Amino acid sequence: MTTTNAPTLAPRVIKKKRRSFPKWVVTTGWKHLIGLGLVVYAIFPILYILSVSVTPGLRVESSNNLFANGFSFDAYFNLFNDPDRPFARWFANSVVVGLTTSLLSVFICSLAAYAFSRLRFRGRRGGLMTLILIQMYPSLLGLVAIYGILENIGRVFPPLGLDSLLGLIMVYLGGSLGGGTYLMYGFFNTVPKEIDEAAALDGASHARIFFTIILRLVSPILAVQMLLSFIGIISDYVLPSILMSHTENLTFAVGLQQFISDPYTKDWTTFCAGAVLVAAPVVALFMYLQRYIVSGLMGGAVKG
C-alpha cells in the first residue's frame, strides 16, 4: 500500500500595513491628545497645592512656577504647633462627623430602600415621589430653618443644639436620607425577588432576609453611598460655619479658613498643607472602595 505525501501549505503571514502618522492622528491620535489634556487639567491644581504647601515663607502670590522656590516642610509642622488653631482637633471632628454620618446613612437608607423595593404598603408611590421632589430644592434654602430648630432644641437639650457635633451629625443625616434612599432603591430592584421568595419559603423573616442575604448582594451600592456621603460631609464649609462657633468644635474646612482670614497675614502655605493632609483619608477611602464604585453606580441603571 503506497501513500502519497500531500504538499503542505505554509501558513500565510498577513502583514498589517502600518498607518502613517497623519492618518493615525486623524483616526486615533486626537483621542489620546484630548485624554492627555484632561489629565493635565485635572492634575495641575493638585500639583500646585503640593507646591505651595512646601514653599518657604507665607506669601506665594509671586510664585508662578511649580516647586520654584525650594522645599520646606515647616507648614506641616506649624499645623500641629499652633495652640490657637488646633488642627488635630479639627481633623478629628471632621473624621468623626463624616464616618458617623456616612455609616448611619448607609444603614438607614438601606432599610428604607429595601422597604420601598420589596414591600407593598399604602403611600409607597407617594413616598418615592416625595423623595424625588425633595432633591430638587437646594439645601441652602433650609439653613435659616435648621439654625432656628437647633437653637430651640439646644435650650432644652444642649448636646443636640447649636455648636455641638451631635447636632451637626443629625442635620447631615437628615439631608442624606432622601438621595441615598432613592439611589439604593434602584440598585435593590436589580436583585431578583426569587431570592426573597425562596428564603421566605424556608421560614425566613424580612429582617433575616435583609441582614443575611440582601446586604451581601448590594454591597457595591453601600460602598458608593458611604463614599459619596463621607466626601460631601468632610468637605462641606457652609453648614459648619453657621452652626459651629467655638474653636474646638470646628471642622477642618472652617478651621483652615482662619489661616487666610486675615488679609494682611494670609498663611497660604499652612492652608495648603492642611488641605493636603485632609485629602489623605478621602483618597485612601476612595482607593479602598474603588472596586465597588463602578458596579454600584451602574447597577441601579439596569432595572429601576
Image (cartoon, rainbow, N blue to C red):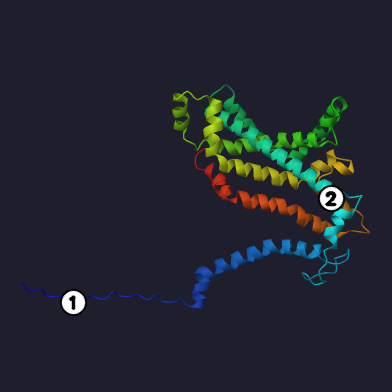
Asked if residue 135 can be seen in this view, the reply is no
| Residue at the extreme left of the image, as rendered | 1
Label 2 crowding class (10 Å Cα cut-off): few <14, some 14-19, many 20+?
many
Label 1 crowding class (10 Å Cα cut-off): few <14, some 14-19, many 20+?
few
Which residue is the site of mark 2? 87
| Closest to the observer, 116 or 296 | 296
Residue 269, image quadrant: bottom right
Give the residue drawn at x 85%, y 69%.
62
What numbered label is drawn on residue 88? none
Give the residue drawn at x 87%, y 57%.
78
Q: Is residue 130 left or right of residue 193?
A: right
Dots 2, 1 in contact, CB < 8 A: no
| Residue at the extreme right of the image, as rendered | 264
Give the residue drawn at x 48%, y 78%.
20
Indicate the amino acid at tag 2. Phe
- Indicate the position of residue 13 as horizontal and vertical percent values: 33, 75
Element type at marker 2?
helix
Which residue is the site of mark 1? 7
- Indicate the position of residue 234 as horizontal and vertical percent values: 74, 46
Element type at marker 1?
loop
Asked if residue 199 can be seen in this view, the reply is yes
Indicate the amino acid at tag 1. Pro
Q: Is residue 79 left or right of residue 177?
A: right
Location of the N terminus (image quadrant): bottom left
| Closest to the observer, 291 or 155 | 291
Is 153 situated above or below 223?
A: above
User: In 3D space, how far apart are the residues under numbered discs 2 and 1 (Cα atoms)?
Assistant: 83 Å
Q: Earlier in the sequence, mark 2 or mark 1?
A: 1
